[in-house]
Amino acid sequence: MSILLNEPLLKFPIAVAPEPGVPLEVAPGVLWVRFQLPFRLNHVNVYLIDDGNGWAVLDAGIANDATRQVWEALVSGPLAGRPLTRLIVTHHHPDHIGLAGWLSERFGLKLLMSQTEYLEGQNIALNPGAMETGPYRQFYVEHGLDETTTKVVLKQGHGYLRMVTPLPPTFRRLVGGDRIKIGGRRFEVLSGGGHSPEQIMLYAPDDNFFLGADQVMAKITPNVSVWAVDPEGDPLGLYRRSLKELKAHIPNGTLVLPGHNLPFYGLHERADALEEHHVQRCDLILSACGAKPHSVAELVPVMFPRVLDPHQMSFAFSEVLAHVNYLLNEERLEWNEADGDGIRRLKLA
């Protein structure tokens, strides 16, 4: 995720985030709790929704002892007397799904999520070392990442994939277009691709708020990446489609409750800014490839000029490839003839 500010266009009803682990009512019957993350993006937002005799949970936080301790403190403290009722997970990334298995078992919760995200989460939990195998290593090497950096990325850059507890063997499937009730409140289930294959979002039209997960956030762009398992995928095309669908479906005056950063008003302006951001990123790639052919690895500093650690490099590399694949599908880029070093490079179409 990269920083992208357009705060003058947005309105923030709460100027300062709550302290980690301290619930704050952000909408009637909705509690916002921040959990800390051990990364540059140092927090994730979890929401508790009034579910009659208890609280429905939206997202679980990452699987580490600190997050477990916060959950235990919440249940025995601020939420005492009202149990957790069910767990909705927006998508399979470890900061959102990490403790879903533990929460489900510890508190007897039914898990609700999309089928694609459930299967992705199962794949990570069952085989977190899969990313280190031959075909995936070759994915990085053929796009120009040197062997040393590739090893570091595979060993350390995907280390966060291990911060997930095994998911329960059964779940309830959520599909975009569904309607569900939580307490006495009606929610429309939306789904969108790009950041994750089938991310779930919840819209409460009668109460004018939108639980948008990581699809639209105030200060950062969601990571939109191509991964080795789907090397020719076009997640950026899916993401741009999702932004258009959200603008068409959700009124601009709706309160957005995101997976990271502060709640805000200004969904349409933010979606427009995200669109423009990706147009600018594509222009950077086209300009570089117009000067000379570039590999994906050579394009990383074009889009991300700062020094990157292995965790950041794995995401940066995959996000550059997302823009490359989008431009290939748009027939604005094409693969150059091999230079003899086995590395694939791009030129203008």
Image (spheres, rainbow, N blue to C red):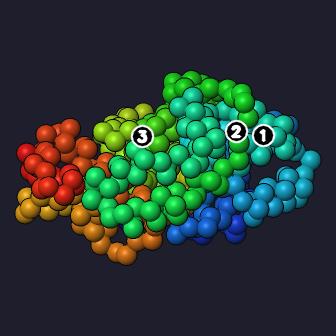
Asked whether the viewer can see residue 134, the reply is yes
Give the mark nearer the N terminus: 3 vs 1: 1
Asked whether the viewer can see residue 22, the reply is no
Question: On the rendered structure, is 110 left or right of 58?
Answer: right
Q: Is residue 45 above or below residue 195?
A: below
Say which residue label 3 marks.
229
Question: On the rendered structure, is 266 left or right of 67?
Answer: left
> Which mark is in front, 3 or 2?
3
Say which residue label 2 marks.
167
Place residue 327 in its image quadrant.
top left
Say which residue label 1 marks.
104
Whether label 2 touches label 1, CB < 8 Å: yes
- Dot 2: element: loop
How many numbered discs sit on the rendered protein?
A: 3
Extreme residue toward the right, this view: 81
Q: Which percent across, then down, holds residue 289?
A: 12, 58
Mark 1 Cα within 10 Å, few/some/many (few <14, many 20+)?
Answer: some
- Dot 3: element: loop
Q: Which percent across, then down, holds residue 274?
A: 34, 53
Q: Could you give the CA–CA distance between mark 3 and mark 2, rounded to whole angstroms?
A: 21 Å
Give the mark nearer the N terminus: 3 vs 2: 2
Mark 2 Cα within 10 Å, few/some/many (few <14, many 20+)?
Answer: many
